[in-house]
Image (cartoon, rainbow, N blue to C red):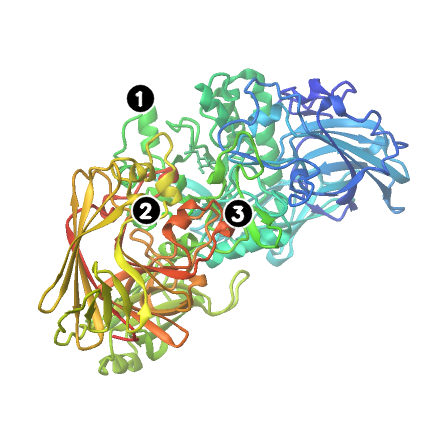
Amino acid sequence: MTGFVPASADRFGTAFVESVDPGSGRLAPRAAPETDAPVLSLDGDWRFRWCAGLHDLTDGFEAPGFDASAWDTLAVPSMWQMHDLDGAAPYGKPQYTNISYPFPVDPPRVPDANPTGEYRRTFTLPAEWPATGRTVLRFEGVDSAFAVWVNGVLLGDGKGSRLPTEFDATDHLRAGENTVAVRVHQWSAGSYLEDQDMWWLSGIFRPVSLLHRPEGGIEDVFVHADYDHRTGRGALRVEAPEGARVTVPELGIDIAAGETARVAVEPWTAETPRLYDAEVATATERVRLRIGFRTVAVEDGVLKVNGRRILLRGVNRHEWDPDDGRTLSVETMRRDLEVMKRHNVNAVRTSHYPPDRRFLDLCDEIGVWVIDECDLETHGFDLSSWRDNPAKDPVWREAFLDRMARMVERDKNHPSVIMWSLGNECREGENLEAMAAWTKDRDPARPVHYECDLEARYTDIWSRMYVPHDELERIGRREEDRCEDPVNDERRRSLPFILCEYAHAMGNGPGGLSDYQALFERYPRLQGGFIWEWIDHGVRRRTEDGREWFAYGGDFGEPLHDGNFVADGLVFPDRTPSPGLLEYKKVIEPVKIRIDPEAATVSVANGYDFLDTAHLRFAWRLEDDGDPVADGVLDVPVTAAGEATVADWPEALAKAAASPSEGERWLTVSAHLAADTAWGEAGLELAWGQAPLSAPQPTRRGPLAAPVQTADRIVLGEAEFDGRGRLTSLGGIEMTGPRLDVWRAPTDNDRVAWGMLDLASKWRGRGLALDRLEHRTLAVEAGADELVVTTRLAAAGADTAIGAVYRWRADASDRIWLTVEVAPEGRWEVPLPRLGLRLAVPKDLDQVEWFGGGPGEAYADTRAAARVGRFRSTVADLQTPYVFPQENGSRIDVRWATLSGGGRTLGFLGDPTFALTVRPWTSEDLDEAKHPHELVERGELYVNVDAALHGMGSASCGPGVQPQYQLEARATAFTVGISAAAGR
Ligand code: IPT
C-alpha cells in the first residue's frame, strides 16, 4: 500500500474533484470494532445548501462564525435527490443508467454541472470527553467525494462512496461547541470507478460519528478463528496492539494478543451461525467482538467450509429503500435477511460495493455466506471498447488498492465473509491483479473472487455470469472450452465454479431455475450462484390522489437512462416477495421430499451442508379435489446433512389413503421449522413434496343436444350464439367470446435482449403482427350434434395466419364443450406467446376458485412452487404488480375454475387442464401501460383459458427460454367445458 496523502488547503475545487487520489488527510483503514471508548453520533439534522456546481460554492461556509440559519436542514444520513420527489424536489432528482456513465467519458474530468451539497452542524463535545488520546471523525459512506472541516480547519478529503473514511480531528476540537462542515460533490474522478447498475444518488448517506481513541487503545484487531473439522477444535489468534489480552469467557480463553488458543468449539456456518462473545482489552480500552470459528478452503477443486462442500443459494443484494435510496435502517437490513432466510436463501453477494457495516453484523448473527465486493465498477468504458479503462492505467493503481484495503480492513473480522471480490465489470487490468495480490497477502484465509478474470489467473474460484444451462453442464464436467494459455487452462479447470450472477429477476420470471439447480446438485464443481438481483430499485411515488407507484429510469425526465432495467429483483420495491422469490424458495429448498405411493413411503433427502433435520417437523395432508380428507404428523428420523431417510407412512395416513377418494386425491408432505429461529417462527414451511394418489377424474359427458337455428341466432343447450357463430350468453350470463387468442403483454424477458432482436419485436413485426390479429369467419355450420365455426386469424399486411375451427357441443349436464382446432399457415420461425381462448364476462363475477396449480402464478419454466390444491382469490389479488406492466397472474394446471358474484357462477372445466388468467383489463391494456397505476379497470372481466404459454426464460439479461419450454406454433387442438354452474 502506498501511504495516505496529507491534507493541504488547496485540495478542494476542481483540482480535488478531478484528482484520482483517493483522498488526503485520512487515517489508515481499520476494523474499528465496537468499543467502550466514548462515541458521539453526529447523525441528525444538518444545515444544508445545494449548489449547482463548483462555480456556485459558498465562500467561508466552513467558518465557525458563518451564519447558515437561512439554509435548509437535511437529515444525515440521507441522499439528497430522494427528498420531496412528489413536491418541489429541491435537490435534483435520481438518474438511472446501467452501463453508460451519465457524463462525457473523459477521465478524470467531470461536468461543470456538478451538484454539490454543503453541510454544516455544530455539536457539543460532552463534558466527560477525555482530554487525553485522539478524537477521530468517521464517515461510513459519502457519495461521491467530500472535504471536511472542523472549526474552520480542513481535515482532509476522500473518495470511495461505499467505504469508510476517518480523519484525526484532535488538534482542532475545543471544549464545548464545535462546528463541522462537509462539502460533498456528486461527480468526481471516483465516479469513474463507481459505474454500478443503479441510481446515481449523492450525499452523506451512511452514519457519521466522532470516536475517542484512547492512548494505548486498540486501533485495530484482526481475528483469525479457524475450525479444524477433524478435531472439532477452533484455533483463535487475534492480532492487536502489544499487551492486549483476548478473552472468550464461554470458552475459558484468556490469551495475549498474538497467542493462539486451541479449544473445542461449535463452528460457525451460515446454517449454524454460532458466535462467541469476546473481548480484547488493554489498560485503556475494551473492544467487543463476536467470533465465529470457520475455515474456508479450496480443496480437491471444490470450495469447502469446515471441510465440507457448500452450495450457494444466493442473491445479489444492492442496498435499496424506495423512499431513502441507499440509506437503510438496521430494521430494513434485518428484514432483508429475514425474508431471505425464510425463502431458503443462504448467500449474498454485496453487489457491487461493501454494504453498511451493520448488515455484516446481522449476516454473522443470522447466518448467510457473504461475498464481500469492493466498491468498484468501470463498466461504462465498455462502450468505448475499454479504451482508457482505469483498471489498466497505473495512474489509478492507488485508488484501486485503496478501495480494496478499506473494505478488507473494515470487514476482516466477519465470519460470514467467506470471499473477497475485487469489484464488478472492470474487465481486466494490472490494477486488479495488484488488488488480488495485496488481498492474498493481507488475508490468505479467504479466496479472492472476480468475474472478469476470464482465465482465473489471480482469482481462487472461477466465476461467470448468465451462463446457459448446456454450457454450465460442460463446466460441471470440467469439459469447458480451453483457455488460450495451457497453464491457465489447467489451473482454471481445477477450480470450483460459481455463477456470481444468473437468472435475471426482471419482471415475470426468471425461468429455468429448477434446471440450474439440478446442475448445481449434480456436479460438485458447480457450487451454486447468485440470482440477479434481490430488490427492484423502484422509487416510491404517489399520484395526486394518493395512489402509490414506483418510478424507474426515465420517470424523472433523465435525458439518458436505462428504463425499467433497474427493476429486476426478487422482491418488489416495498420488499414484498415476487412470484420469482417463491419459485426460488421451492427450487432451493434445503430438504427434498419424495412420496412413493406404491411403497407407501416418504423419502427425505437432507440437502443442508451442515445441519441435520432435528430442527424440522414434518406434516402430511390428504386432499380430494383440494378438500381436506385427513392430516397428521410424520416422524422422520433425524437425518444428517447430505443423507437421506425413507419413512413409512404412519398408520393414520395409510388408512386415510385407502379410503375411497372423492375426486382427485393428492398427498402433500411438508417440512416446517420446529421452533422459532432468529428469522422465522415455529411452523414456517421450508420444503414440501406432493404426489397424486388417484388418477384425475374423468369428466362426465351426457348425450349431446342438437343446435337449433332461428333467423338471427343459434341455440345449443344453454348457449346462445349470434348468426356469425359467436357465443353471446350461457345460462343467461352474457359474454363476448371465447375466441382464439395468442397475444400476451410482452414480459421484460420477451422484450429486452441486449444486441439481439427481441422476441416481442418479432411478434409485433409485420410478418406476424400477433398483437393485431383480425378474426374472419369463413363458415358457420349447424350439424346434427355440433355447431362448427370455421375462422382465420391474420393481421393486415401479414402473410402468416392461424386457421381456427371451433366445434361446439352441448351435453345433458348443461355444459357446453368447445374444441378448437388450430392450424398455423405460412412461415412460423418464432414461438407463440400463448395459445388459448379469451372471453369477456360480467364484472361482478370477481370471486375466483380453482382446483389446480397455485396459489401463485406459474408458467412452463417457473412452475416449481405451484402445488396442486384448491384455491380462492379475488380478481384483484390474481394480478402481480410488476413495476413495468406485463403478462402476469396465470395459474397453471387448472382442472376446473369458477368465477362467481352477484348470485351467479360461471364454470370452466379442463380436458384435462388449462392455464387461467382473469383480469379487469385486456392484454392490450397491459401491453400499453408503463406503470401499474395507469391500468384502468374496464366494465368487464377478461378471462384467458389457455392450452399453453411460452416460458419465461431470462433473456432480459441471459439465456432465453429453453427448448422444452417454448411454445411452438404447430397444428393442435384443445378442449374446454363451460357452464353457468359450479363443479364438475
Ligand atoms: C450485469 C451486471 O454485473 C449487473 O450489475 C447488472 O447490470 C446485470 O448485468 C443486469 O441487470 S453485466 C451484463 C452485461 C451481463
* Cβ of mark 3 under 8 A from ligand 1: no
Residue 542 in the image: above or below residue 437: below
For residue 474, side relative to residue 301 (left or right): left
Q: Nearer the viewer, mark 2 or mark 3?
A: 2
Q: Nearer the viewer, mark 1 or mark 2?
A: 2
Q: Residues within 10 Å of mark 3 (few under 14, many from 20)?
A: many
Q: Earlier in the sequence, mark 3 or mark 1?
A: 3
Question: Residue 484 — which label?
Answer: 1
Q: Residues within 10 Å of mark 1 (few under 14, many from 20)?
A: few
Residue drawn at (66%, 21%), measured in percent from left and top?
A: 112
- Marks 1 and 2, how far apart at CA: 27 Å
Rendered-image quarter of ligand 1: top left
Residue drawn at (40%, 26%), measured in percent from left and top?
A: 457
Residue indicated by mark 2:
516
SS at badge 1: loop
Residue indicated by mark 3:
416
Residue 624 location in percent, x, y? 28, 76
Residue 882 location in percent, x, y? 46, 50
CB atoms at circles 3 and 1 under 8 Å apart? Answer: no
